[in-house]
Image: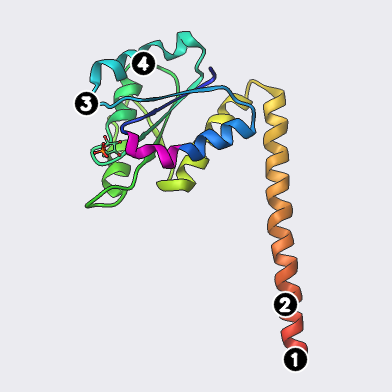
Amino acid sequence: MKVAILMGSKSDLDIVRGAFDVLDDFGVEFEARILSAHRTPAEAAEFAASAESKGAKVIICAAGMAAHLGGVVAAHTTLPVIGIPMVSEPFKALDSLLAIVQMPPGIPVAAVTAGKAGAKNAALYAISILATGDENLAAKLKEFRAAQKVQVLGADAELQKELAERKKN
Ligand code: RP5
């Protein structure tokens, strides 16, 4: 296992699956658990404390509402921790985002945006951390960026064609 993923509830799983997809695409081994900072605090702490010895290089924590999971995990490990704020009622993702980023100095947690984009970016960020020590993965990341660029430039070329047609008519 290279990446450990925790989510606070089964209700987070649909969004977190987006991170599984990216890690699978890059061939990065991960382990994922549903463990809560509040409902299963001992299990979450034990998972965090043992992740490094199981080979994890980075931990992703998805949580909503009073999203303390990333902070609690970071308190039990020196591995980099990335938080994904979950969208929840009544404050959407703002409460989760603030809970994740408002760590006291000394125990950092990085945060990505909420929702699907956040899950995808958490996985990509974890991959970029792993890629600093893995040439293969670094090459795959560069390929991914190049493919993304081709897609955007393709869309732009189509738009220019459409606009040129409009001018003619
Ligand atoms: C958090 O509370 C979880 O991460 C979830 O986003 C939120 C709501 O949990 P459920 O009531 O849906 O289990 O701990």
Q: CA distance from mark 4 to mark 2?
A: 54 Å
Would you name the residue on which mark 4 appears?
47
Please state the extent of the stretch shown in magenta in the rendering: 10-16
Instruction: Report x, y in % for residue 29.
Output: 57, 22
Q: Residue furthest bottom?
A: 169
Q: CA distance from mark 4 to mark 1?
A: 64 Å
The secondary element bearing badge 1 is classed as: loop
Queried on whether the Cβ of the residue with tag 3 lies below 8 angstroms from ligand 1, the answer reads: yes
Would you name the residue on which mark 3 appears?
39
State which tag comes first along the sequence, 3 or 4.
3
Instruction: Report x, y in % for residue 23.
Output: 57, 31
Instruction: Report x, y in % for residue 128.
Output: 59, 31
Q: Is residue 147 left or right of residue 5?
A: right
Q: Residues within 10 Å of mark 3 (few under 14, many from 20)?
A: few
Mark nearest the camera among 1 and 3 is: 3
State which tag comes first along the sequence, 4 or 2.
4
Would you name the residue on which mark 2 appears?
162
Q: Residues within 10 Å of mark 2 (few under 14, many from 20)?
A: few
Q: Nearer the viewer, residue 55 or 135?
A: 55
Question: Would you say the magenta stretch is mainly helix, strand or loop?
Answer: helix
State which tag comes first along the sequence, 1 or 3.
3
Mark 4 is on which residue type?
Phe
Q: Nearer the viewer, residue 48 or 138?
A: 48
Would you name the residue on which mark 1 appears?
169
Q: Residue at x 67, y 35 (%)?
A: 141
Identify the image quadrant of residue 34: top left
Q: Residue at x 52, y 12 (%)?
A: 55
Mark 1 is on which residue type?
Asn
Q: CA distance from mark 1 to mark 2?
A: 11 Å
The secondary element bearing badge 3 is classed as: loop
Instruction: Report x, y in % for residue 27.
Output: 64, 27
